[in-house]
Image: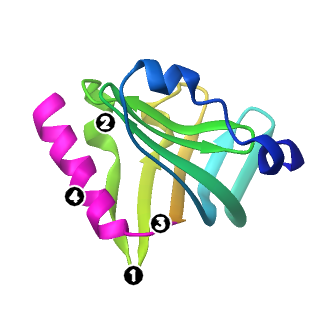
Amino acid sequence: MAWWRRSGPDLSGFNREGLLHQETAGGTITYRHYRAPGRYSSWAKEPRRWTVILTQRRFTVLGPHGPVVNVPWTDHRFATLDIRLDGEKLLIVADVSKFGADASGYVEVRAKCADSAALLGMIRLLQRHVG
């Protein structure tokens, strides 16, 4: 994780897609009844730093090891994401079986953004107009 703190994620690909919003935020990831090759957890919660990115093409949440959420606005799986507020945090709940045949369970990403309500509004607007 030290490399990310020093240099930050490479945003060049996102800039080419028309970067609309980029924000680094603290938060957590929670695994519920999660199974994937090499990993199982009935429940686990871990602290994380996220980079939340909105482009004209997709919604992405980058963690220290790569994207946790990376869904184009036009992808039918976007509708399976439960995106809402949890207090002052942006909450994204994903049924991982919708994104990969070799995984099951749920992943919850919480990000304490500067203005989570405004960001949620922007996500919903882009989902309606681009998707």
* Range covered by the magenta-colored residues: 112-131
Which of the marked residues, 1 or 4, is nearer the chain's N terminus? 1
Q: Residue at x 79, y 51 (%)?
A: 5
Q: Nearer the viewer, residue 80 or 34?
A: 80
Q: Nearer the viewer, residue 33 or 54?
A: 54
Q: Which mark is residue 121?
A: 4
Q: Residue at x 52, y 64 (%)?
A: 110
Amino acid tagged 1: Gly
Residue positioned most to the right:
2
Residue positioned most to the bottom:
87
Q: Where does the C terminus fall, quadrant-wise?
A: top left
For disc 1, the marked residue is 87
Q: Which mark is residue 130?
A: none
Which of the marked residues, 1 or 2, is nearer the chain's N terminus? 2
For disc 2, the marked residue is 78
Instruction: Give the left or right position of residue 51, taking residue 10 as reference.
Output: left
Q: Tell me the SS state at disc 2.
A: helix
For residue 90, which quarter of the picture?
Answer: bottom left
Amino acid tagged 2: Phe
Q: Residue at x 20, y 39 (%)?
A: 127
Q: CA distance from mark 1 to mark 4?
A: 15 Å
Mark 3 neighbour class, 10 Å CA radius: few under 14, some 14 to 19, many 20 or more:
many
For disc 3, the marked residue is 113
Amino acid tagged 3: Cys
